Amino acid sequence: MKVKNIVKELGLSVFCGDESLDREVTGGYVSDLLSDVMGNASEGDVWVTLQTHKNVMAVASLKEVAAVILVKGHKPDEDTLAQGIEEEIPLLGTEMETFELTGKLYELIQNQNGG
Amino acid sequence: MMLKTFRADLHVHTVLSPCGNLDMSPGRIINEALKKNIDILAVTDHNSTRQCRVVMELGRQKGITVWGGAEINTREEVHCLALFDEMNAIDEFQKWLDKWLIKVPNNPDYFGDQVWVDAEDNILGEEERLLIAALDRNLDESYQLVKSLGGLFIPAHIDRKSNSLSSQLGFVPPDIQADALEISPKAEPALVDKMGWGKIKPLVAGSDAHWPEKLGSHLTLLTIKDTKLEEFKRALNGESGRSVMPELLKNKGG
């Protein structure tokens, strides 16, 4: 499963990182505590959060997550977006709340891995 | 110019904070400060300045400088101290807090009472909204507002495992918009040194006291001309021999 498949299936908006939408997705991680994400997210995860601070991109880069999804219609801060563009990290968005998005995302990734 | 080292506790809660002990009345706070030879203290309740005025007035009568402000909780759920030393700015700041504090009613049985009192401990008012909730304003927006009112903006207990820059944002952003960074009473000097926080912004400390005995247990030593907030600002800029030193780090060769 690639990031672009998730974008299409879940109707996500793409704030930046268009050039990296072919990245392979291997799992997901959901947390708004960046200290927790630093300790526990894995490479290739899609990270779901409502934090919009620039540190989100630093942590995404450090952990080599496949993409970041901002929930509930949150938009990245200006400098967050700038860093996402520079580092070519897919930064995605949805109006959905975390619960709904994550349920759909889980199903999507499980189906892919199972089939 | 004569400089003097003042003992400052820059983080003190009062009876108004839901988790603040009912003994933290203006009278008790000032008495504790007198007993412990504290020159300056800052009243920093969660998301409210409503107890500041009485403590500031009482401090003035008893010869202790009291700065007012709050310990705000930003949208990222990072606690930050906002400090002012004049009432007009504090009143404007309160309007901003009232506008942006999310409206969750307090449950006093669970979280504690949120009352503010006069110098004789008579209740002056009660805050209905839960003060430990967050503001719908992020770090940068909060910094801009505090600066526009002439205050100081200091992310609190940056080393703590909750409600800190470290916990919420993973690490202290090297380009953080702030005047200083506060280390918690539990900060390990070796860790503070290793993390290099002092290279990002000047470090300060406070007791984060919620009950009287703890007041003054952690101090910042301010070597300044007088106890005006303006002098603290100059010290943070390292102007003309002024300095800011958390007592906790004093013996670390600083």
Image: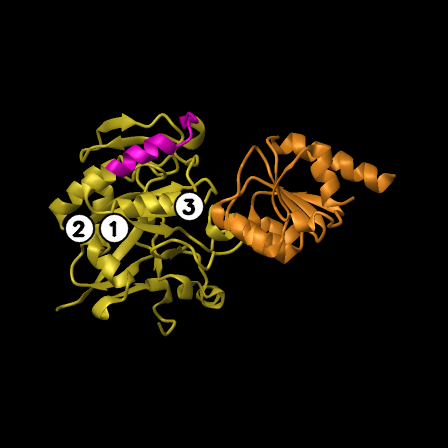
Chain colours: A orange, B yellow
Residue B17 as seen in the image, left or right of residue A100: left
Q: Position of residue A17 (x, y in %)?
A: 63, 49
Q: Position of residue B41 (x, y in %)?
A: 25, 50
Q: Is residue B94 magenta?
A: yes
Q: Is residue B241 above or below residue B24?
A: below
Q: Is residue B217 above or below residue B82?
A: below
The mark nearer the N terminus, 2 or 3, is 2
Under mark 3, the amino acid is Leu
Q: Position of residue A75 (x, y in %)?
A: 53, 39
Tags 1 and 3 touching, CB below 8 Å:
no
Mark 1: few/some/many CA within 10 Å (<14, 14-19, 20+): many
Q: Nearer the viewer, residue B127 or B36?
A: B127
Q: Are marks 1 and 2 on the same chain?
A: yes
Residue at the spot of label 3? B139
Under mark 1, the amino acid is Leu
Report the disc number at residue B64: 2
Residue at the spot of label 1? B41
- Chain letter for mark 1: B
Tags 1 and 2 touching, CB below 8 Å:
yes
Segment colored magenta: B92-108
Q: Residue at x 47, y 67 (%)?
A: B190
Tags 2 and 3 touching, CB below 8 Å:
no
Mark 2: few/some/many CA within 10 Å (<14, 14-19, 20+): many
- Chain letter for mark 3: B
Tag 3's secondary structure? helix
